[in-house]
Amino acid sequence: MPAVLRVALPVPLLTLFDYLPPAAGEACAGCRVLVPFGRGRQVGVVVAVEAETAVSGSRLKQVIRLLDETPLLDAELMQTLAWAADYWLGAPGEAYANALPLALREAKPPPALGDEYWSLSSAGHSAHDAGSRRGGSKTLLALLAAGSMSAQDLTERLPGWRETARRLAAAGLLERSERSPPDRQLPASLAPQLNDEQQLAVSTVGASLGQYQPFLLDGVTGSGKTEVYLALIEQVLAQGKQALLLVPEIGLAPQTVRRLRERLGVIVEVLHSNLSEGDRARAWLRARNGSARVILGTRSAVFTPLPQAGLIIVDEEHDSAYKQQEGFRYHARDLALVRARALGVPVLLGSGTPSLESLANAEAGRYRTLHLRARPGTIRPPQVQIIDMRAQRLEHGMSPALLTAIAETVARGEQALVFRNRRGYAPVLLCHSCGWHAECPRCDRPLTLHAGRRQLICHHCDYQTRMPVTCPTCGATELKPQGQGTERLEEALISQFPQVPVLRVDRETTRRRDAFEQLLATLKDDQPAILVGTQMLAKGHDLPNLTLVAIVGVDEGLHSVDFRAGERLAQLVVQVAGRAGRARKPGRVLLQTHQPEHALLRTLLAHGYAAAARELLAERRQIQLPPYSYQVLLRADAPMREHMDAFLTDAHAALPVSDQLQIAGPMPAPMPLRAGRQRGQLLLEAGSRHTLHAMLRSWQLALTVLPSARRVRWSLDVDPIDLY
């Protein structure tokens, strides 16, 4: 009997599937195959070639077609994915599918590796000469009038160009072509002189190139961590090796690409969800064949093949965006460490506010810590002060002292940032007459008023309804917005400072691809402006003329039931504060609070993030919370409460009896109703990771066969970072 192929399919089932080999070609581990599955077909990845099968050979179906003559996934990546699926309790097929760009999950040949280029057709030249087009079309035609340009160059020069290009191509004015990637070196800029701390960090990590060693680069905001990354990547390139740099947000990618390319003089391949699927697949394939030397990407880029790996860097390692919250719930930072060990290369975790997990690993000697405590040159850390909001008359949530500080800042021709981590106009719409407030019928949570769209929107399930003219309960017209979101702050600041540009940066204003980059591009470095934004603005952006940062709504983070709330608030305050005074002008940070004596705020102000983190770690150690214990969260939801309760009760009963296992629940989720579904959870905790994982896979298999499991949606989250 011929050998049997064990295939991982992108379905949420905890098993591999056996198939007979295809009629043509020899499949091996790491190749993609097209197979019959149910009534349809699926593209899967061959995990192993086995001599035996669990089912009778006569019942096995044959692979329809072999899609790759040589393995698409190499041995290291296959081994890492198998480990990851086991550790995070993922369905094997979902783990393997995560490693492939969408274009490579289809039954098509891999795309050609040529670069995408755009140029004017003869009709396009005529249209440009005639000036017959307006707006973005005119700009794009003018840009291409001097000659063809690559898609990557167009993205840098004209964010959001692609939609316009498709429209012009359909009109016959543009032509698309592919060319081989250039071998030429791009002009590289000179590196600045590193200070002593930066130089020590570079030489220490550089001495470990060629072997596995985790490093934690603990650098205050603005201390020049990126310069350390660049110097190390230069060393890796000089050895003919590849470097992978992970960033938490898509918004950070364009400015990082520019810095990398300008300094290093090489093509930088980018991998994130805002790219076209063809571009992502090409970048992934170039990394796989070794022609891509520097790869920059967000969370999923951790799966990039690195046949000539030299270094992995995880920037802003504390950021929760590295944790996948649906489907295969891996953590990209932790997976980067696993890959670095398998590849035998150093991994550098950088942050101005390291996670408590990383600090605990450094404390235990598992990571080597490198410190950057000084900002380069004469740049001073921003001055931070608390504004006591008690007994103050507020203007849309802003104190007189805050408004005065903004006025002084813009009068000097400088820029101010008002930070509020809540989008929309107001979080509550209230009837002043009877007390009714607008509530989501599917979540039992207040609807957020979005005044610009005259809509009430649930930020949990996206339920939307028109803003009522009168109260649905009593018919009164006295409907009052309560609280402030970024939209309301924007309106208030425009009214207060009519001569100053006010820019709002949140999910509403950056929905379009490249909109974030375009918004920031409108800021002139030498002109006054006011920015209003959510945490999108807290991460890594250099705004040289920004000298004032005001954080409103600090108190919400001081009263959360989530044990991670203090850590997140401290990180957010420090990261947002780090946007101020990054160039030669001194920065100032204002924190508005009704709790000016709160211990966490006082420690942060008096002694900085490191001291606050030490206190938080001591608290966690005392009550045995992560990182001094290990957790798994079973989440369940169902349309009917009794079905969810029955499943969680059965799941609890299926657990092994162990005095080393602490169980919390079954209990309602912190948000018990969402999108019309009742939600509950069961939290498992143990002092040993081995103890916890020893029982997880068998428990997971037991859950799949519970009769009550058929009436609920459920998932297991290993090392959860969000208990909601």
Image: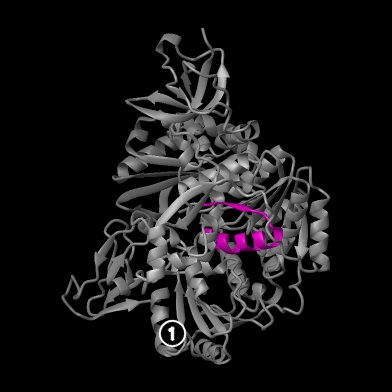
Which of 177 and 665 lies nearest the eye of the viewer?
A: 177
Percent across and percent down for residue 699 are 50, 32
Q: Is residue 659 visible?
A: no
Magenta stretch contains residue 212: no
Image-based side of 608 in relation to 235, left or right: left
Q: Is residue 253 magenta?
A: yes
| Residue 413 placement (x, y as % from top left) | 57, 89
Q: Considering the whole magenta stretch, tell me its main secondary structure.
A: helix
For this orientation, the residue located farthest to the left is: 475
Label 1 belongs to which residue? 493
Q: Examine the rendered structure and indicate whether residue 225 appears above or below residue 681.
A: below
Residue 406 image position (x, y, % from top left): 53, 87
| Visible residue check, residue 647 | yes
Return the x and y of residue 698 as percentages of the image width and height.
52, 29
Please tell me whether residue 673 is drawn above or below residue 572 in the rendered image: above
**Residue extent of the magenta highlight:** 250-272
